[in-house]
Amino acid sequence: MRVLVTGGAGYIGTHTLIELIAAGHEPYVVDNFDNAVPEALNRVSELVQRPIPFTDCDVRDRKALTEVCETFRPEAVIHFAGLKAVGESEERPRDYYDVNVAGTLTLLAAMEAVGCRRIVFSSSATVYGVPEYLPYDEAHPTVPLSVYAKTKHMAEGILTDWQRANPEGAVMLLRYFNPVGAHVSSRIGEDPQGIPNNLMPFISQVAVGRRDKLMVFGDDYDTADGTGVRDYIHVTDLARAHVKAIEFAEHTAGAEVFNIGTGQGYSVLDMIRAFEKAADRPIPYEVTDRRPGDVAAMEADASRAAKHLGWRAELGLDAMCESVWGWQSANPQGYEEGR
Ligand code: UD1
């Protein structure tokens, strides 16, 4: 299928391009390179040995998006473009609602202009809020707490209503748990700007010597070792879930929600130990206060994706850590160029 990929130069987007091409699809990227660099697309292009067509455009730019759609005629869209830092979303709510919510509406208008009715949306398990029970299934109540979570929840609602008004359309809402890992080639990976907010990029920057030590946010949670537990999912598994979702959307109509996780939770200390093994070096850390807004544990019940999409995570914790170390040690400063 011809697949328009918004935010295709980003962390999850680049990995998804590789899996889309491997599965015989034809991607076209739009990205405004706000939190991504063209070098990432160059590297995808090297890996797949073909050019990756793209347009430098903002997902809120209706005219530019419509022009791309009129030229490329997408049969499906994968919508990654968005802002994703929880802390920043509290400081810049207007930007988050504008990009994540208004951007989704603009994209739908451009899709309608060319009769494209299939979309896979990059949502987040953060829409569930505080767990009432674990593992989360898709029927768990959604109580989004941060501005970021609210923007994802609103976009899910917009897409669901849009599908109801376009009954032949297909909307796939993928609620990601904690994406980590890098491509096996070590050529592409996560490259956060500034100080990483998330655990895995922070650990890998400590391992490579860019930062002195990791701060562990609390060891007094009600978990086996007291540190926070999360369901980490390898980005290559996550990328493959998108391919399964567009292929499912090709033959179906409706709005569907899928948890994308492994079902296996690991604590912060588990992650440190696994990374120490992969990188063969100690990760200095210090326990500090809990981070406001963090929950003790999150785990996915991903059986719905297995049943309907025929997708399940295949890569375990060692593959996650080894691939991150491969990427970080080969690219200590990330993509460098364009920064
Ligand atoms: C965070 C976001 C979530 C978003 C996800 C995307 C918050 C509160 N949540 O999830 O909405 O969808 O990223 O990837 O920001 N930790 C440390 N030290 C660190 C960093 C993290 O101990 O320097 C701990 C955290 O307390 C948590 C675990 O590591 O227990 C994972 O944290 P993180 O990678 O930031 O992910 P989430 O908080 O689960």
Image (cartoon, helix red, strand yellow):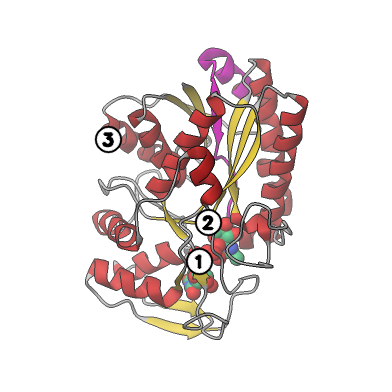
Identity, as a three-letter code, of the amino acid under mark 1: Arg
- Residue 25's spot in the image, x, y percent? 41, 24
Q: Residues within 10 Å of mark 1 (few under 14, many from 20)?
A: many
Residue 34 vertical position relative to residue 327 in the rendered view, above or below: above
Taking the view exactly as shown, the residue that stands out farthest to the left is 280
Few, some or many residues within 10 Å of mark 2 (<14, 14–19, 20+): many
Residue at image coords 66%, 43%: 100
Task: Give the side of residue 271 with respect to residue 227, left or right.
Answer: left
Q: Nearer the viewer, residue 101 or 60?
A: 101
Residue 296 vertical position relative to residue 68 in the rendered view, above or below = below
Tell me the kind of residue under disc 3.
Leu
Residue 281 is situated, as x and y percent measured from the top left of the image, at 24, 74
Q: In which image quadrant can residue 173 be found?
A: top right
Q: Secondary structure at mark 3?
A: helix
Question: Could you tell me which secondary element the residue under label 1 belongs to?
Answer: strand
Q: Which residue is mark 1?
A: 230
Q: Position of residue 197 (x, y in %)?
A: 51, 64
Magenta span of residues? 65-85
As helix, strand or loop, the secondary structure at mark 2 comes to: loop
**Which of the two marks, 3 or 1, is nearer to us in this view?**
1
Q: Is mark 1 within 8 Å of ligand 1?
A: yes
Q: Which residue is mark 2?
A: 177
Camera sees residue 20: yes
Residue 10 in view in this figure:
no
Q: Which residue is mark 3?
A: 47
Picture quadrant where residue 148 is located: bottom right
- What count of labels does the image hold? 3
